[in-house]
Amino acid sequence: MNTTSPAIRLDDVWLSRRGGLVLESVSFELEEGRFAALIGPNGAGKTTCLRLLLGLIKPSRGSVEVFGRPPGRLDRPLGYVPQRVRIPHGFPLTVREMVLMGRYGLIGIGRRAGSDDYRAVDAALDKVGLSDMAGRRYQDLSGGQQQRALIARALVGEPLLLLLDEPTASLDAAARARFYTLVCDLQHERGLTLLVASHDLEDVALHADVLFLLDGTLRASGPPTEVLASPELARAFAFPPPHTHGSVAPGGDQS
Amino acid sequence: MDFLSYGFMQRALLAGSLLGVTCAVLAVFVVLRRMAFIGVGISHAALGGVAIGLVLGVSPVLSATVFAVIVAWVIGWITSRGEISEDTAIGVFFPTAMALAVALMSLSQTYRQDLLGYLFGNILSIRPSDIWVLAGLSGGSLALLAVFFKEFLFLGVDEEGARAAGLPVTALHYLLLTLLAVTVVAAMKLVGVVLVSAFLVIPAATGQSVARSMGGMLAVSIGSALVSVVAGLALSWQWNLPSGASIVLVGAGLFFASLALGLRDRRVGQ
């Protein structure tokens, strides 16, 4: 791990898919230990950026680095929390089995999980408040509980960087509040770097340190108050986005 | 159990059990990855491979294995590019390979009879030498499944999550397809092309209906496959039924029983 490099660096990243331009000269950096959010309308390239960082796709041009290295060549696994995991209805995967999967990269191929791994799973379940649900089927949990299980799965891999893709998209307000309290705790306790792709401007404005506004290209970046006050925001969304609690409203008006 | 006093029935039981266990473990991943259709696709592709082998004068099992593995990889490659879905890719290769088999089959009456043997299989015609080949194939497949079980599981549950955790997802995907292709070719001589796909779905579906964990699902899947083989052979002996069909029908019966049991348990739990 190169500690002098930023946690994330995208440098002049271009990406074409099926003849269309998905990302156009996107460049940004995220320092270690910060909580950043990728915001933007549908099709802005938020999930694509996460997929680039995970090494699932390669840029057509430009470079992507995670802790100074190309994605996929890291010493430690990335923590990844998808919007949801779709497994066949009724598949009997327990919450504990789901969380243990986050440990597989550390355990290694052909080796079985040991007592240390199960201790890590129990600790992660405890951290996300799901200890009493460990033996239940993952599919029997509510949307918010499933999200917490996926966070626990990401945590057991002992990542330094957590990537979250629309993690609160299907959650109600209370579950969203619990979710952000949990990830903010993790950021402070473990020094985790967090990058969340989200539509939810109000929540990320309240919790993130940095916002990156994407709309095919990077339109704005900086602290939430600056980005939400930027005229680029209204332009990117093409409609007035929701007001933020007691902070600067989009477009520069004081709410 | 007097039917087990005959050598051909003993060999059928052994061969069926070896392949039943291998298919039962593979079936867990087939169900998890929603690949039920792939067993049909690969087995029909293998039939095309058998026809090629017969025409070229090489071992039909060898040509079927090579052809099935190639077709499985091509289906996997096309699907991974995201251009078309897996079921569409299988839907293209399945009739194409069948058409190839039918076209080659028309060349000779001898080919036709040989191909019909693969189409419906005959577990009772297993020779002692076949048992060793099956034992090697099943043993190798089960060893690889044991080594990569947790990785295949993660791949089936969440491919992107598996990649983020540092697993070699692409290599694992092709390894699973290869295991499926080899197992299908080995199994189709026993139960035939038409029924082999059932072997790759029904045991795991039975396990899924009643189990409460992955370990439980695996155990029920293997157990139901073994019961299907033993009871299927016994029924075929008793009532002079085709063995492959009897085995699959017993498996289907176990599935419906487990489905009813699972539904009842869920109702009681509510």
Image (tube, coloured by chain):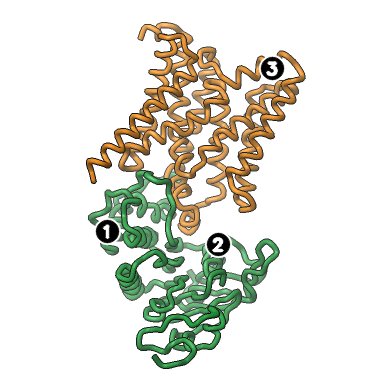
Chain colours: A green, B orange
Q: Give the number of the mark in front: 2 or 3.
A: 3
Q: What label sits on residue A130 in the rendered view?
A: 1
Q: CA distance from mark 2 to mark 3?
A: 50 Å
User: Disc 2 marks which residue?
Assistant: A55
Image point 45% across, 18% down: which residue? B246
Q: Give the number of the mark in front: 2 or 1.
A: 1
- Across and down, in percent, residue A189 comes to 31, 73
- Mark 1 is surrounded, within 10 Å at the Cα level, by few (under 14), some (14 to 19) or many (20 or more) other residues, namely many
Q: Helix, strand, or loop for circle 1? A: loop
**Left or right: B191 with respect to B207?**
right
Type of the residue with mark 2: Gly
Asked whether A166 or A79 is in front, the reply is A166
Image point 30% across, 42% down: which residue? B212
Asked whether A40 or B45 is in front, the reply is A40
Labels 2 and 3 share a subunit: no
Q: Helix, strand, or loop for circle 2? A: loop
Compared to A110, does A205 lie above or below?
Answer: below
Compared to A212, does B71 lie above or below?
Answer: above
Image point 47% across, 70% down: which residue? A197
Assess whether mark 1 and mark 2 are in contact (beta carbons under 8 angstroms).
no
Compared to B218, does A68 lie above or below?
Answer: below
Q: Chain for mark 3? A: B
Labels 3 and 1 share a subunit: no
Q: Helix, strand, or loop for circle 3? A: helix
User: Disc 3 marks which residue?
Assistant: B112
Q: Quadrant of the N terminus of chain B?
A: top left
Q: Chain for mark 1? A: A
Residue A186 in sight = no
- Across and down, in percent, residue B45 comes to 64, 32
- Mark 2 is surrounded, within 10 Å at the Cα level, by few (under 14), some (14 to 19) or many (20 or more) other residues, namely many
Q: Earlier in the sequence, mark 2 or mark 1?
A: 2
